[in-house]
Structures are given as structure tokens and as C-alpha cells.
Amino acid sequence: SQQGEEDPQALSIQEGENATMNCSYKTSINNLQWYRQNSGRGLVHLILIRSNEREKHSGRLRVTLDTSKKSSSLLITASRAADTASYFCATPGVQALRSASKIIFGSGTRLSIRP
Amino acid sequence: DTAVSQTPKYLVTQMGNDKSIKCEQNLGHDTMYWYKQDSKKFLKIMFSYNNKELIINETVPNRFSPKSPDKAHLNLHINSLELGDSAVYFCASSHKREGRNEQFFGPGTRLTVL
């Protein structure tokens, strides 16, 4: 079953605007990751936030994590055409308690940046 | 150079055939994965190997058989291909570290079963 659910499923904004994507998950986690997938390519890891962190920045990316609400958000500031991609959140699966290797991906948000 | 590579990139074949997809990583990671991404972009884990040992085996038909000759390679063999096997298959790798499991993905293999 899908652990993470992204919201919205699709988002279209003007270049230069900020894009916000949300992720909700169901079980307790020790970290949450965000990945980007350009059309026809593999996923690329963007950022990992630990459960004891509330906010993390990386360049134009800002990730928040609210463990009480079991939700995370990814904010891309000053969007560019190259940001057009699908964005996925990923959380550890139950088996990760033993192997720390299994992660479960959400359904993704398709972000389109209009020039 | 590509850190995680897969071959072939595209695979078109007839129903009932047997095919293999190969994956190699040069990152020195000890864990490798196979994922299936369907037409709706849902990405689902199929298998994971750690140091050539199978550690994750999701509910996947036994027509799918992974093989890891060494920790840098994880191949996927599919017998008796069916129409529903059409998807993009991604290989990934990671280094097993407590609390962190960033994965590095290959470019994907688009499998089309006719």
C-alpha cells in the first residue's frame, strides 16, 4: 500500500512563482525523503529530513516535517522551467526497522512550470 | 559516468517470451533494488539485495527472478512475459546506514509487452 500521499497530484504555476507540495503518511517514521523525477528519467534524491528536524533547506528547496500531523511539505522558491518534473516523498517501510533499506514512495506530484 | 546503469533502456517483446534486464552500480553501495513504475507513476519496490543476499521480496509473481552475482550487479529475469508486465523498471542502490537510506536510481528500462 502507498505510505505517502502527495497533494496536489498536479500543479501548474508561472515561472518565478513558488511551488508547494504536500505529503501525508500513515506510520511513525525516523526520516522522510523527497525525490524528483524528470520525464523519462530515474528518480533523483533531493533532501532527507529526520524526525527530530522541523525544517531543512537546500538551495531553493525548503522542506518541513510535522510528525504530529504526519505530514511534510516541499517548497520550491523562484521556480524555473527546469523544475518541471514529478516530485515524490518517500518514507521508511516497516522492514526498515531491521534493514534500514526499504522505503515506500508516495504517488507523486506532477509540477509544470509555465514560461 | 553514470553511477547506476541499466541495460537495455527500451525492451519490446512478445507475450510469453523470457527477458532479462541488467543493472550495475559503481558507487560501492552494498544494497540494490528493483522497482516497477506503472503508467500512473506509482513506484513499487519488488526486490532488494544486500551484499548478494535477498532481503526484500515483495509480492511479486515467481516469473520474476532477481540474481546478484556480486554486490555491484543485480539483474532481473522475467519468464513468460505478460501484458501486465509492461512498465518502467528501475534499479537503485544505497549504502546501508542506520537512519539514512538515500537511494540512487538508474535511468530505467521501459518494457513493452505486445
Image (cartoon, rainbow, N blue to C red):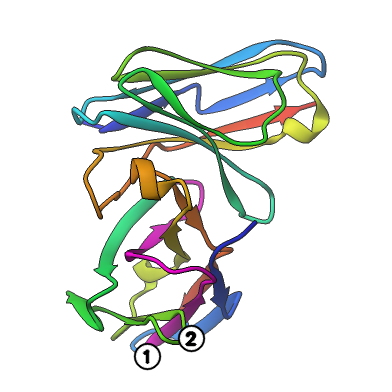
Q: Few, some or many C-alpha atoms within 10 Å of disc 1 (few <14, some 14-19, many ≥20)?
A: some
In the visual, does A55 lie left or right of A15? left
Please give left or right for residue A23 compared with residue A50 in the image.
Answer: right
* Three-letter code for the amino acid on which mark 1 is drawn: Glu
Circle 2 crowding by C-alpha within 10 Å: few under 14, some 14–19, many from 20: some
Corner quadrant of residue A8? bottom right
Instruction: Report in which chain the residue with disc 1 lies.
Output: A
Quickly name the residue at label 1.
A17
Residue identifier under label 2: A13
| Residue drawn at x 64%, y 13% as measured from the top left | B19
A74 or A64, which lies in front?
A64
Closer to the camera, A6 or A109? Answer: A6
Give the camera-side residue of A40 and A100: A100
Q: Residue at x 37, y 90 (%)?
A: A17
Residue A109 shows which numbered tag?
none
In the rendered image, the residue lying farthest to the bottom is A17
Q: Is residue A57 visible?
A: yes
| Magenta region | A17-41
